[in-house]
Image (cartoon, coloured by chain):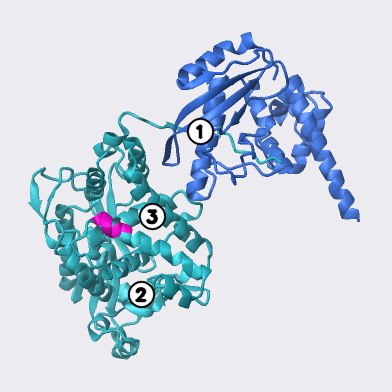
Amino acid sequence: MNISERQKDFLSVIEKLDISPTLFKNAQSKYEALAAFLDEHDIEATIYPQGSFALGTVTRPAKKADSPCYDLDCICQVTGTKSDYTPSGLRNLIEDTLKSNNTYGGKLVKWEECFTIEYADINGVSFSIDLVPAVSDSEPEKAVLLTKGLSPQIVDTSIAIPRQNSEKSYRWISNNPKGFKKWFDEINAPFLMYAPKYAVRGIFESTTAEELPNEVRRSALQRVIQILKYQRDTYYSKLSNGDDIKPISALITTMAARIASNYGKKDCSVFELLEYVLNRLEMCIHQTEMTFEQYALQYDKSPVLSYKNGKWNVPNPADPEDNLANKWNEDERIPKSFFKWVTTIKKDLFEVMTQEDDNQFGVVLENSFANYDPNNPIIKKYRKARVAAPINASTASKPYHCS
Amino acid sequence: MRIDYNHIKSQIEELLTSYGDLEEEDTDNNTSIILSGRVAINRSYNGFTVDKEYDIRILIPLNNDELPDVWDIGNHIDKSYIHRYPDGKLCLETKAFMALCFYNGYSLLQWMENIVEPYYYSYEYFSRFGEFPYGDRGHDLVGVTETYQQIFDESDCAKVYKLLQAISQRKYKGHLPCPCESRLITRRCHGSFIYPFISDDYLFSIAQKDYSSLCEAIKEYDKQSNH
C-alpha cells in the first residue's frame, strides 16, 4: 500500500475530468465572438466568465458520462449603468439581438436570469454557455456597499442583473462575480505559485505534456474545491431532495478559500489542504453544543461557518450582508446532512486511503467517479476485476423492525 | 416451511460453493443446520457500491415451521441499529415476505442474494446517507401491513384488511367479486396475490396469525378510543 501513489491516482481522475486547454480556448473564442456579434449590432458589451469557469473550479456534470458537457457561466455586461435601462429593457435587448441571428437564435434557451447557448462537441466533449445580461450597479448602490466595509476595488465591479418575476416582469438583482473572483484570486495566488505548470492529458488531445495556460492551471486550493464539489454531487444525489439541501458551490468555495487563507503552508499538497479544510469544517458543528464564546476559546475565534443566536452564517465576500448559508436557517436537514457528509468524505479520503486493502480504496474511487467516467483505468487498477452485482429494488428485502 | 435435510442438502452445497468461507457446523441434522463463517458481499444500487466481508451465522431450521435466521457474529452492525436484535439476530424481513419468496421457489442461495445481502447493503447505505435505499419496514404490525400492501400491490390499508379477512376464511372463488370490493371478479383483481396464502398451508398459517394480530390491535385501539 502506497498512500502517495493512491493520492496521485485520485488526483489524476480529477484532472482527467477537468476542462482541457483546448476546450477552454474554444469557449473563450465563442464568447468573444458573441461580444463581437453584439458590437456589430451596436451593443457595446464585455463578456467574461463567472463562477467556477472564472475561478478554475469547474466540475463535469454527472449526466451523460459518455458524452460529457460542461456548463460555463458568462456575464454579458453592457456598457452603462442600471439607471440607463429597465431590467426588462436590457433583457429584451440581448434576447432580440441574439434571436435575430441564425447561429444564436436557434440555440437559445431562456431561463430566469440567463440564456443558454449550446455548442457542438469537440472530440466528444461539448459545452454550453449560460449568458447573463448585466449592467454596472449605479453609484448610489456602490456607495451603500462601501459603507459595509468592502474595498473600493471590489465594489467597483458590482453589477445589476435582470431576474424574471413573472412571464414579462423583471426586477434587478445585485451581484459581483468579478469582486468575488478578485477576492478568491488573492487567496489562491500563493497556492497557484506552487501549482504544476505542465499536465499530461491523454483524453482530450495529444498525449504529450503541454504547458498549461494560467486559466487551466490548478492550485491545491482549486483542486480541493473541485474534490469537494464532486464528493458533494455524488453524495447528495443519493439523498431524497438532495438537490434542495446540498451545499451550494459558492458556499463551498467561500468556506474552503477562507480556511485556506489561514493555512500557513502554501506549498502544501492537495490532500494536506483538503484534510485541513475538512477538519476545520467538521469542527464547526461544536458551535451548536456551546456558547460562541466557549467555542472561540476551545476551537476557533473566527469560524468560516459561524453559528450565533441559532443562526448559521457565511457572509458573501463580495457582499457581507448576503448570507450564503441563509437556507441553512430555514431547513434543519441542510446543516444536519452537511456535517454527516463532511464526516463521510473524511473517512473515505483519509481513513480508507490509509487502509491496507487496495480494493476498499477502489470502492471509494468507484463510488466517487463511476458516474462521471465509468471506464477510468485507475478505478480498474484498484478494483481489479471485481464487479458489484446490482440489487433489484423490486425484489430486495426491506429490513423489518419487530419487538 | 417444513424442510428435511435430504431435501435441502443440495442447496446447502450450492451455498457453500458460492460462499467459500462458510462452513457447516456439527449439529443434529434432525432439527437444524448451522453454517458460519465469512461472506463477501459486493453489491451496488443507485451508483453506490458496497464490497465488504461479514462474519455471520446462519441457522436453517429443519422439520418445523420456522424460517432461516442470520446472526451478525462479527458485530459489523451497530448495536443501536433498529433492524438488529440485541443478541445479534438480524430482522431480515417479515415472515410473510420471506415465506412467499420460498413459496415462489427461492433456493437458499437466492435467499442469501435477495434477502441477506440486500440487508447488509441496506445497513451500509443507511449508515452513510441516513436513508434506506429501497425502504424499510415499519415497527411490528405497521411493517406487517406494509408487507401485505406490497404483496397484494394495494396501497389502501382497508382493502388489505379485507383481503386478509378473506384469506382467513380460506375460500378461493375466482369468479366471485373480489374481497376488496372493487366490483371486479377476484381472478381479475387481487386473485393471483391472495391465492398462494389460501392454497399453501404455511403461508396460510402466517397470514392467519398476522390477521389475528391486526384484529387484536384494532380491537385494542377501539377500546382505548371509547374510553
Residue occupied by mark 1: A392
Say which chain is blue: B
Q: Name the residue under label 2.
A: A316
Which portion, as a residue range, is magenta? A270-275
Q: Distance between the residues labelled 2 and 3?
A: 20 Å
The x and y percentages for residue B131 are 53, 48
Where is residue B121 drawn, in percent x and y?
50, 37
Residue A402 falls left or right of residue A33: right
As drawn, the residue found furthest toward the right would be B227
What residue do we see at 51% from left, 52% from top? A240
Alpha-carbon span between mark 3 and mark 1 = 25 Å
Tell me if mark 2 has few (under 14), some (14-19) or many (20+) residues whose alpha carbon lies within 10 angstroms of its own: some
- Position in image of residue A313 (x %, y %): 43, 73
Report the amino acid beneath label 3: Arg
> Residue A110: horizontal and vertical position, in percent?
36, 63
| SS of the residue under disc 3 | helix
Q: Count the marks: how many?
A: 3
